[in-house]
Amino acid sequence: MKSNNWLILGVVILVILSFSMYSIVESNNLSITINTDGTSTNVNYQSFLIWTVPSEMEKEVKNKASGDVQSPNSTVDIIKSDIKSIASKYGYNVNVNIVSQYGINQLPMAAKVKGTSMVPTLKDGQSILVLKTNNLTVGDIVVAMHPTYGLIVKRLSIIEGNQVYLTSDNKNIEITNTQTTLPNGSVETVTVEKTPLNTWLPTANVIGVVKVY
């Protein structure tokens, strides 16, 4: 009888030790879900064990995730890499997912229209929501990075190989006359014609498609 008791006790101890070792390994693994609608960002943590993520890590992850979501240069892969890099500093192996109104690992970005080149479709100062994607279709309104003008919003008119032709919805030519009085008293008039930008760009410069405006 005593031998059976010792056997049972040994089995119990072995189970406890095995579970403890498993817990130690699993405690370093967690899943991080970044929830965003393009304007706000929340971070959720999931793990096999119930524990608290270090507050410094939570703050760093939150700030980085929020900044990346707002950055026109970020992608899903970049955000995942950034968060994994932060977690590794605290000794954690993480699986990262981004969840938005467009699905899992679909990244939206908020932006604001500057200028009148897309009137009447888009007005100066209007808020828009862009889905970062390389799935492009002629007729889409897209946001792209221009080497001279920075971020621009245009209509995708032509896709040709690895190049796209972006055009303005506003076809009006804006004419301004500026008068300057010269030292001799005569008046000089300078006429400037401003045509909305139409441009070819590499497809890689397109950040995404405008979904809400």
Image (spheres, rainbow, N blue to C red):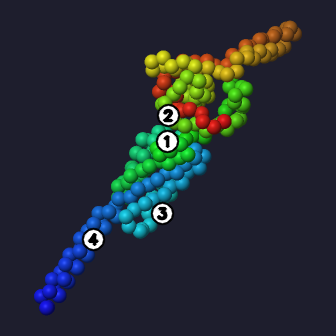
Q: Earlier in the sequence, mark 3 or mark 1?
A: 3
Rounded to the nearest angstrom, the CA distance separating label 3 from label 4 is 27 Å
In front: 69, or 164? 164
Ranked by sequence position, the earlier of labels 1 and 4 is 4
Q: Tell me whether circle 2 and circle 1 mark residues in contact (CB < 8 Å).
A: yes
Of badges 3 and 2, nearer the viewer stands: 2
Which quadrant is home to the N terminus? bottom left
Q: Mark 1 — residue? A: 106
As shown in the figure, which amino acid type bears the numbered disc 3? Answer: Ser
Q: Secondary structure at mark 1?
A: loop
Image coordinates of residue 208 in percent, x first then y, are 54, 33
Whether residue 210 is visible: yes
Residue identified by numbered label 2: 133
Q: Which residue is mark 3?
A: 55
- Measuring from the top left, give residue 75's x and y in whole percent: 47, 39
Picture residue at 67% right of the left edge, 22% below the top: 169
Q: Residue at x 53, y 46 (%)?
A: 100
For the residues labelled 3 and 2, the Cα–Cα distance comes to 33 Å
Cβ–Cβ below 8 Å for labels 3 and 2?
Answer: no
Say if 172 sits above or below 37 in the image.
above
Residue 111 in sight in this render: no
Give the residue at the far right of this rendering: 185
The residue indicated by pointer 4 is 19
Q: Earlier in the sequence, mark 3 or mark 4?
A: 4
State the residue lying farthest toward the left. Answer: 3
Viewport quadrant of the C terminus: top right
